[in-house]
Amino acid sequence: MMRWVRMILLGLVAFAVVTFGVDWLVFKVTGSPRSRYTVNYFVSAPLKNSKEEIDYVGSRDVSCSLTAYPQEGFPPCWYLRRHINQTTTY
């Protein structure tokens, strides 16, 4: 049983390494394509009675890479598109 778990785990790690390598190679060959999305920032502050206050801080354009994994310090666009509202809790 432990042998199967080890083989499955090794296969998953190998899959992740290969897909990241292919993603990076395609990113470099296509000229590092990027896009921009407007991200809204909010601050959440706790109040009494387990309530919270959410304040709008502002928005700004954030660059993203057109890849499956983060490349060159930019988040992937599919992730940023799904998280255009970001909240910080204090």
Image: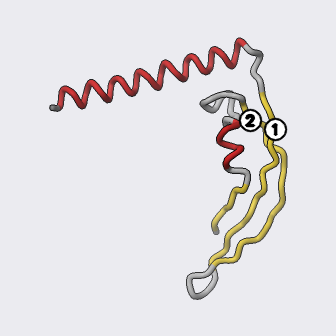
What amino acid is found at the position of numbered circle 1 in the picture?
A: Arg
Secondary structure of the residue carrying numbered label 1 = strand
Q: Position of residue 25 (x, y in %)?
A: 63, 14
Dividing the picture into quarters, in which one does residue 42 lie? bottom right
What amino acid is found at the position of numbered circle 2 in the picture?
A: Cys
Which residue is at 55% across, 18% downward? Answer: 21
Residues packed near mark 2 inside 10 Å, few (<14), some (14 to 19) or many (20 plus): many
Which residue is at 71% across, 29% downward? Answer: 66
Q: Position of residue 62 (x, y in %)?
A: 79, 42
Which residue is at 76% across, 58% downward? Answer: 41
Disc 1/disc 2 C-alpha distance (Å): 6 Å
Horizontal arrangement in the rendering, residue 15 relative to residue 51 (left or right): left
Residue bearing the label numbered 2: 64
Image quarter (top left, top right, bottom left or bottom right) of the N terminus: top left
Residue contact between numbered discs 1 and 2, judged by CB atoms under 8 Å: yes
Residue bearing the label numbered 1: 36
Dividing the picture into quarters, in which one does residue 73 lie? top right
Which residue is at 64% across, 82% downward? Answer: 47
